[in-house]
Image (tube, rainbow, N blue to C red):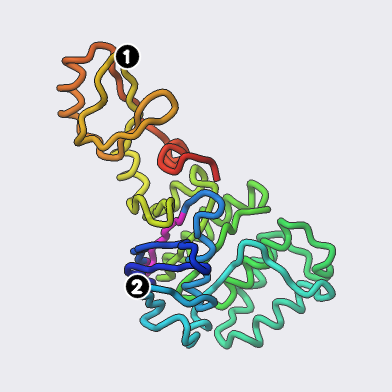
């Protein structure tokens, strides 16, 4: 495993931010981490990078304690809000990266510059948020890392850039065996690229499944106002005038409907499932 987090807990002072986090990422696997703002996504990525120390549990990244920082040369990291010295040009930034990472692939990095339409002569101070995101993405990918940690990488990218990242680029990266942990707020766009989706809420991971498995296990349930609640085995919770279950059982539902005329169930897309489980938008 490239990432193995077991029972991870993190507190800021007395305030718990993460509790009992279990998460793995294997070679060639793309895992999305979704949660409302403030849920702890960035905190978890900072723990994996060794920028913070855990308060409980264990973390291994590339078979090592991230606090030792011995594996940073094999990790590509893109922060949520990339920042570079404003006086530098794109060429200067990429030159620094090439000097820092012995495995830097100049040809691959130059190809990314062209495909992401990044001006190499302009100084960073003139860059828009989207241009900063594209430069940070090249910095994260250029040394062909074994593990890629992306904190909301599509923030600021235009639709073309998002499609390139979530489609062709990630596909090529994982084909080479790189594992990817992707904190994102664009679940519908990322859906087709993912192997697994982990939803973070109330300081813990609520679900960790493939998008197809998650959609198959979830239903929105509607019934008359005087109807009894859904079967307890469905573990349904109230949402938007109905109920949502993440433990769909068609046989149980058919039995319930036989005694409850007017009850019906409908499928949910990934965004709707996220909102139902977390109680909010990202």
Provide the secondary structure element on which disc 1 rests: loop
Mark 1: give few (<14), some (14-19) or many (20+) Cα within 10 Å: few
Residue 12: x and y in percent read 52, 67
Where 161 sits versus 98, above or below?
above
Where residue 102 sits, quadrant-wise, is bottom right
Residue 64: x and y in percent read 39, 83
131 or 237, nearer to the observer:
237
Where 163 sits versus 94, above or below?
above
Can residue 45 be seen at all in this image of the molecule?
no
- Residue in the picture at 54% in, 63% down: 42
Provide the secondary structure element on which disc 2 rests: strand
The residue that mark 2 highlights is: 57
Q: CA distance from mark 1 to mark 2?
A: 46 Å
What is the number of callouts on the image? 2
Mark 2: give few (<14), some (14-19) or many (20+) Cα within 10 Å: some
The residue that mark 1 highlights is: 224
| In magenta stretch: residue 275 | no
87 or 52, nearer to the observer:
52
| Magenta-drawn segment | 25-33
- Residue in the picture at 52% in, 65% down: 43
Residue 259: x and y in percent read 17, 15
Where residue 2 sits, quadrant-wise, is bottom left
Can residue 28 be seen at all in this image of the molecule?
yes
Q: Earlier in the sequence, mark 1 or mark 2?
A: 2
Where 250 sits versus 96, above or below?
above
Where 59 sits versus 192, above or below?
below
- Residue in the picture at 83% in, 70% down: 123
- Residue in the picture at 45% in, 52% down: 193
Q: Can you say which quadrant of the picture contains the N terminus?
A: bottom left
**In this rendering, would 184 be left or right of 250?**
right
Residue 177: x and y in percent read 40, 70
**In this rendering, would 233 be left or right of 119?**
left
């Amino acid at each position: 495993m490239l990432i193995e987090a077991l029972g991870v807990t993190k507190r800021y002072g007395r305030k718990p931010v993460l509790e009992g986090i279990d998460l793995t990422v294997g070679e060639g696997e793309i895992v999305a981490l979704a949660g409302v703002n403030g849920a702890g996504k960035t905190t978890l990525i900072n723990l994996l990078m060794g920028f913070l120390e855990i308060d409980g549990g264990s973390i291994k990244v590339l078979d090592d304690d991230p606090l030792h920082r011995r594996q940073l040369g094999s990790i590509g990291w893109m922060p949520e809000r990339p920042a570079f010295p404003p006086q530098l040009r794109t060429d200067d930034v990429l030159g620094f990266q090439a000097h820092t990472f012995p495995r830097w692939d100049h040809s691959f990095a130059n190809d990314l510059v062209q495909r992401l339409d990044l001006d190499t002569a302009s100084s960073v101070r003139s860059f828009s948020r989207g241009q900063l995101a594209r430069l940070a993405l090249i910095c994260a990918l250029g040394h062909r890392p074994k593990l890629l940690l992306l904190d909301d990488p599509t923030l600021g990218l235009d639709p073309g850039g998002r499609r390139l990242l979530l489609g062709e680029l990630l596909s090529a990266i994982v084909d080479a065996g790189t594992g990817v942990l992707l904190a994102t707020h664009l679940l519908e766009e990322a859906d087709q690229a993912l192997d697994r989706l982990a939803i973070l809420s109330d300081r813990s991971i609520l679900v960790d499944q493939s998008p197809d498995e998650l959609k198959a296990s979830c239903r929105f349930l509607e019934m008359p106002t005087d109807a009894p609640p859904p079967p307890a085995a469905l573990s349904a919770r109230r949402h938007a005038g109905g109920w949502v279950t993440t433990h769909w059982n068609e046989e149980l539902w058919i039995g319930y409907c036989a005694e409850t005329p007017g009850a019906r169930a409908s499928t949910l897309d990934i965004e709707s499932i996220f909102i139902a489980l977390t109680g909010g938008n990202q």
